């Protein structure tokens, strides 16, 4: 089984680090009623990915700087927040967070909530670069131009300052080393410096990035940490960038499972969420979406064009062009094409469900077959029972949902209607077109509308 993103815990340097995540910006370029950092990629919000990467890097003590609207939504999710009422810049946002946090000696990581692709390793690296001498370590990345990122201006001695793109001279705009927006500060040094950040720049904002120059002027050191791959520090500002980030994230998830022994025929059209468990030698065919708490046993074949959510599948299961939601299937079940399983279905081993069959809250025992055009809702079916084409469990009487109980070794004829609540006994048989409105005893044979018995009585034999 491959658990996506296995948690790796790393201790801090004596005192464990804490983090501030900036997320109060309006995100106007998303053109959305929803706060930017709550837009999703691979089934989780941008902010979730940032918080998860911090957690995996060993940083649990996190406060998110939010605007009032986002704060309301985050409180409901149990995320600790500080409100920034006016978005006066990243420096202002950090200052507000520091005012709300009790001072603590040690490392303070600052990250931006719109960078979901940052991996835990980068947070660990930047923390590690903050040795005793440096007051700030910051991640930089080489990126293709043009770019709206802040430029890292260096001298022979090292980083000199960061200039925001809007404040750059043409020569500075040509610099290819960017400020990624991931920082590890010595908290005490940051507290001394943040109060001296001004807003005399092109945007009239308090820039967090001005702390670089201020710390250097105070005789402190700043350590750059060059990211190996600039794609992991891409920010998301609009929906085009969101789709690009989602493709990168999805590819990462696919690669993790492929490395763990899963064949994914076309990662570009296979959509995964984090935390899935997929057994080795399972093959995933194109156009398939798998999410929620889904677990898939080894040697299964999923797709093409299927959707699984909160599904638990045994080994050697086949899902062909079908939807399985909130359901549990045993080994060697064969589903589809064009089947829909939902609402707490529980199937034992070797169940076969064919074309245009919908199952809702159906408990099917081993080797049950329903091959064509059927609705099985709120029912249980015993082992080796065959459900004929066009069978419907009429579970809804307009007020209540009623159950149908079908025992083992039953033969349900084509186009049978089972008007629930009703039971069909072991070994019974219904003829084509039967409308069952009363319980059928074991081994009885019924036909017609309403169903009547045609079984030979013992006396007549
Ligand atoms: C910032 C950096 C830039 C860097 C880039 C990387 C500054 C001044 N510049 O620019 O050097 O290359 O990120 O992506 O830091 N936010 C607040 N409150 C505010 C303003 C912003 O919480 O008042 C949050 C935003 O929600 C966002 C983050 O801070 O998550 C970054 O702000 P944004 O305006 O996107 O900064 P950039 O212009 O991208
Ligand atoms: Mg940004």
Image (cartoon, grey):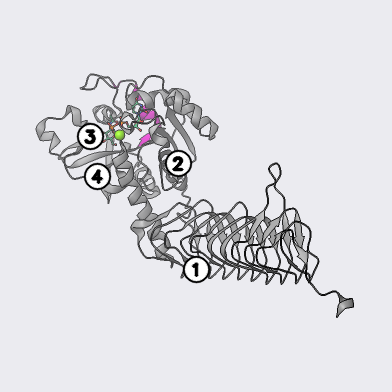
Can you tell which of label 2 and label 1 is closer to the viewer?
1
Secondary structure at badge 3 equals: loop
| Residue hosting label 3 | 150
Q: Position of residue 282 (x, y in %)?
A: 46, 68
Q: Is mark 1 within 8 Å of ligand 1?
A: no
Q: Quadrant of the C terminus?
A: bottom right
Q: Earlier in the sequence, mark 1 or mark 3?
A: 3
Question: Label 1 neighbourhood size at 10 Å, few (<14), some (14-19), many (20+)?
Answer: many
Instruction: Report if residue 404 is visible in the image.
Output: yes
Q: Earlier in the sequence, mark 4 or mark 2?
A: 2
Marks 1 and 2: in contact by CB < 8 Å? no
Secondary structure at badge 1 equals: loop
Q: Is residue 49 located in the magenta-colored stretch of the structure?
A: no
Tell me the distance, in whole angstroms, between the alpha carbons under discs 3 and 2: 25 Å
Q: Is residue 192 located in the magenta-colored stretch of the structure?
A: yes
Instruction: Report if residue 107 is visible in the image.
Output: no
Q: Which mark is residue 141?
A: 4
- Between 416 and 10, the one lying in front of the other is 416
What residue do we see at 72% from left, 50% from top? 402
Tell me the distance, in whole angstroms, between the alpha carbons under discs 4 and 2: 23 Å
User: Residue pushed farthest bottom?
Assistant: 461
| Residue hosting label 1 | 300
Secondary structure at badge 2 equals: helix
Q: Earlier in the sequence, mark 4 or mark 1?
A: 4
Tell me the distance, in whole angstroms, between the alpha carbons under discs 4 and 3: 11 Å
* Magenta segment: 184-197
Q: Is mark 3 within 8 Å of ligand 1?
A: yes
Tell me the distance, in whole angstroms, between the alpha carbons under discs 1 and 3: 48 Å
Q: Is mark 2 within 8 Å of ligand 1?
A: no
């Amino acid at each position: 089984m491959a658990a996506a993103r296995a948690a790796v815990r790393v201790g801090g340097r004596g005192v464990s680090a804490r983090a501030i995540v900036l997320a109060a910006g309006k995100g106007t370029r998303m053109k959305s009623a929803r706060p930017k950092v709550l837009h999703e990629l691979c089934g989780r919000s941008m902010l979730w990915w940032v918080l998860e990467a911090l957690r995996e890097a060993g940083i649990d003590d996190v406060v998110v700087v939010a605007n009032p609207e986002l704060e309301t939504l985050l409180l409901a999710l149990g995320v600790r927040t500080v409100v920034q009422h006016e978005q006066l810049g990243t420096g202002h946002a950090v200052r507000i967070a520091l005012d709300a946090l009790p001072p603590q000696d040690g490392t303070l990581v600052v990250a931006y909530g719109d960078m979901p692709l940052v991996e835990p390793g980068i947070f660990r690296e930047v923390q590690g670069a903050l040795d005793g001498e440096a007051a700030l370590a910051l991640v930089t990345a080489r990126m293709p131009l043009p770019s709206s990122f802040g430029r890292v201006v260096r001298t022979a001695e090292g980083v000199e300052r960061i200039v925001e793109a809007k404040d750059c001279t043409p020569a500075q705009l040509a610099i290819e080393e960017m400020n990624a927006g991931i920082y590890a500060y010595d908290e005490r040094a940051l507290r001394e410096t943040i109060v001296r950040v001004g807003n005399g720049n092109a945007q009239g904002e308090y820039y967090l990035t001005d702390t670089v120059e201020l710390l250097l002027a105070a005789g402190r050191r700043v350590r750059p940490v060059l990211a190996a791959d600039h794609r992991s520090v891409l920010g998301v500002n609009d929906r085009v960038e969101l789709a690009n980030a989602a493709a990168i994230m999805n590819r990462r998830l696919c690669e993790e499972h492929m490395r763990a022994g899963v064949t994914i025929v076309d990662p570009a059209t296979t959509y995964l969420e984090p935390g899935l468990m997929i057994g080795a030698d399972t093959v995933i065919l194109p156009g398939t979406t798998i999410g929620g708490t889904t677990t898939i046993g080894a040697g299964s074949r999923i797709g093409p064009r299927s959707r699984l959510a909160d599904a638990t599948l045994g080994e050697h299961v086949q899902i062909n062009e079908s939807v399985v939601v909130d359901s549990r299937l045993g080994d060697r079940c064969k589903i589809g094409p064009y089947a829909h399983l939902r609402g707490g279905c529980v199937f034992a081993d070797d169940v076969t469900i064919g074309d245009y069959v919908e199952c809702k809250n159906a408990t099917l025992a081993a080797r049950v077959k329903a091959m064509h055009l059927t609705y099985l809702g709120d029912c249980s079916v015993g082992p080796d029972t065959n459900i004929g084409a066009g069978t419907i469990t009429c579970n809804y009487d307009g007020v209540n949902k009623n159950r149908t109980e079908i025992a083992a070794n039953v033969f349900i004829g084509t186009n049978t209607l089972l008007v629930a609540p009703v039971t069909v006994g072991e070994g019974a048989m219904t003829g084509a077109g039967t409308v069952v409105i009363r319980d059928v005893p074991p081994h009885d044979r019924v036909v017609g509308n309403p169903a009547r018995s045609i079984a030979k009585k013992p006396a007549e034999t």
